[in-house]
Amino acid sequence: MAAIYKRAILLLLITLLPLTATGCWNRREVNDMVVNTALGFDRVELNGKPAFRISMLVTRPAGGGGGAATMQRPSSPSGDLVTTTGDTIFNAVRDWTTRSSRQFFAGHVLVMVVGEELARDGIAQFMDIALRHGDIRLRTWVVVCEGRALNALQAQPEFETLISSEIRNIIEKSSPSGSKVPRSDLRQVAHDLLTPGKDVVVPRLRTIVPPEAVSSAGQVGLTTSPGGTGRQSQTRIVEMAGAAAFSGDRLVGWLNEDETMGMLFIKNQANEGVITVAFDSPEKNTSFVFRKVRAKVEPLVTDDGIVMKVRISGTGDLREQSSALIRVNEQDLHKLENLVNREVERLCRRAVARSQELNSDVFGFGNRLHLSQPEVWKELQGNWRQIFPALKVDVKADFTVEHVGLSSQPIVVR
């Protein structure tokens, strides 16, 4: 009897086995697609009415001899930039099908660039379609461009083949080593939008003419246009320049690099970076590399209102000094530590003052209150926008010098 059951099960498995060898019903051939590596979103006017413009940086897979007949632009190592417009973002994306014989694939998008005007109008619609799209990954970086997103995607990459790779690598390399650029992907932006008492902050991107492009004649970044017409154009590159601060889903202003570093200190996101201080000098002459930073934010409810108690600690190394003043003794090292502490506190206070000026709780102070004292938050939640600009923030820093390098004494020129 057992043998019969075994044979029946074996026959059933043999019958079902061919079903696993069927092809993929929704396959997309590589040669029928263009791979998108960056998306730009702008607010524009179309026939006198507000519209959306989508800029797509695409690369055609090798081996494809065809392509879209309407895309009459030379191929380049940096990819092709195609723009579409529509009344809605989704309609603009769908407009791709009227221009290209290839399928649009967004599974390899590295960065999404939001233009300044669209960001000031609100990013809720942009986030809605980005989160609904099945191909776009939640770890895709989001940045706000000063000006138009199209201009950022037209910039020249300096060290990478694609401008999308350039932007992605700047974010990923400068965030942990410089602590001047926030890290915000689609998942983080969505989380901050939906979290009570917390506002969105993303990297601020802008295009610049590289300083080293100044010619001997004093003309900046001038290159002759193709065809030898004599026309001159500027070659522009991208750089990260602080952060874009939101109130709700609307861009309300910018944080510069110092304010961004102060914000990252408070949010416990400052991994490693450089603090410069003036040691017995009117000018900053000493570099301190900080690391192992820990920040703790504690909301305190007092008779005078809410106070955010911020305590920041860390260690670091003395890496540079341009004078012969600092010597490896307890007195000088303690003095250096005090200077570093005051500088960190100054950066944090600048960040708080700027965010309060913009009424943008990029630190998530409201959310801290919500988590630690939910009953108090329940009473204050409706008025948090009025409370935050006058919120008291008590910042104290405590850094220690761990190493002074290979030289224990400064160089004294005789």
Image (spheres, rainbow, N blue to C red):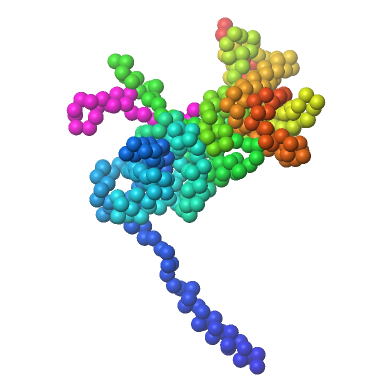
User: In this orientation, does residue 399 appear?
Assistant: no
Tell me the quarter of the image containing the C terminus: top right
**Residue 20 position (above or below residue 173):** below
Quadrant position of residue 178? top right
**Residue 106 position (above or below residue 360):** below
Residue at the image position 60 percent from the left and 35 percent from the top = 199
Quadrant position of residue 162? top left
Residue 305 place in picture, x, y as percent: 76, 26
For residue 233: magenta?
Answer: yes
Residue 334 place in picture, x, y as percent: 72, 18
Tell me the quarter of the image containing the N terminus: bottom right
Q: How many marks?
A: 0
Query: Which of the pair 329/45 is nearer the observer?
Result: 45
Residue 130 located left or right of residue 348: left
Query: Which of the pair 381/148 is nearer the observer?
Result: 381
Residue at the image position 30 percent from the left and 55 percent from the top = 101
Q: Residue furthest bottom?
A: 1
Residue at the image position 45 percent from the left and 32 percent from the top = 116
Q: Residue furthest top?
A: 414
In the rendered structure, which segment of residues is drawn in magenta?
A: 221-241
Residue 174 place in picture, x, y as percent: 52, 33
**Residue 78 position (above or below residue 341):** below
Residue at the image position 54 percent from the left and 37 percent from the top = 249
Residue 202 place in picture, x, y as percent: 53, 35
For residue 248: magenta?
Answer: no
User: In this orientation, does residue 234 appear?
Assistant: yes
